[in-house]
Image: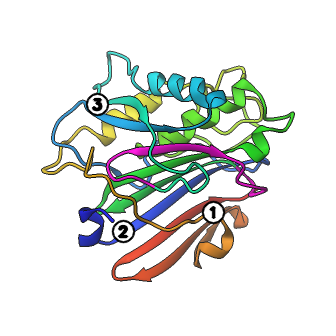
Amino acid sequence: MNRLSRRSTTAVLVAAVIVAAFQSSTSASHSWGGYHWARTQNPFTLNLADNVSASWDYYLTTASGDWNRSPVQFLHVLNTVVVPGQTNPRTCRPTSGRVEVCNALYGNTGWLGVAQIWIGSGHIAQGTVKVNDTYFNTAKYNDAGWKQMVVCQEIGHTFGLDHQDVNFDNTNLGTCMDYTSNPYGPLSNLHPNDHDYEELAFIYAHTDSLTTIKSAPGASGANAESRSEWGQLMKTAHGGRTQVFERDFGNGQHIVTFVIWA
């Protein structure tokens, strides 16, 4: 476990792309709980570790490049770099100071992709992204558009971004942070849009007195893939379509799981 996590309360937040449709509303701001990576200057560089198979490399590289392209009217705060991975894709355990990106046959979980961020003292200390080949090997989702949107969205969560919209059936907003039944649109939901870059500029407008980027390697945390691992139900909203679970491990460590159900 990294030093930051040992000293403070640690949480894992989970965001999932669920296979079927649901209803919700668009939020004016899409910061995910105000969480962000600690760093002492802008722009900062975040490593995205490549634990994906060759069939996913293009989508990871494209998403990394997309998130680096903030328009000139917004403060440029973030650069991402794809680096070699260090974890078993099936377990996708985290590494301090970066994001591990993985693909595997995770089973009939109900989600296409999951992003997890480990929090200590209000800052992201490490993250993981998983894309589920159980669904991406089927005729419906074995498609370039679905793959690009899901990788882009889950990586976006690890920066501290939430969804812009969680309604599958309304008009696309033109961002990968928008749920949709058709990634191609119109509008195309394969890449970030200006509102995503604007939100990143807002989240990272300040600097910190410490950094959680490129910390000493070391994995920590517990799996939170299934309902049995999420712990106690703490909150229900949107008629049961969104729920928050908490699992307490003692010693100031717990997992918080945010779930949007089909």
Depth check, front residue: 108 or 104: 104
**Horizontally, is 86 left or right of 252 in the view?**
right
Q: Quadrant of the C terminus?
A: bottom right
- Which residue is painted at 25% across and 63% down in the image? 4
Instruction: Find the distance from the CA under tag 2 to the CA under tag 1.
Output: 18 Å
Q: Position of residue 232 (x, y in %)?
A: 58, 80
Disc nearest the viewer among 3 and 2: 2
**Residue 206 picture location, percent across and down:** 20, 42
Q: Earlier in the sequence, mark 3 or mark 1?
A: 3
Q: Nearer the viewer, residue 140 or 104?
A: 104
Q: What kind of element bears circle 1? A: loop
Q: Residue furthest bottom?
A: 250
Instruction: Report the disc number at residue 77.
Output: 3
Looking at the picture, the colour scheme in use is rainbow
- Give the foreground label among 3 and 1: 1
Magenta span contains residue 168: no
Can you tell which mark lies on residue 127? none
What type of secondary structure mainly makes up the magenta span?
Answer: loop
The residue at the point 32 percent across, 23 percent down is 74
Q: CA distance from mark 3 to mark 1?
A: 31 Å
Give the image location of residue 79, x and y in percent: 33, 28
Q: Which residues are magenta?
A: 94-111
Q: Give the Cα distance between marks 3 and 2.
A: 25 Å
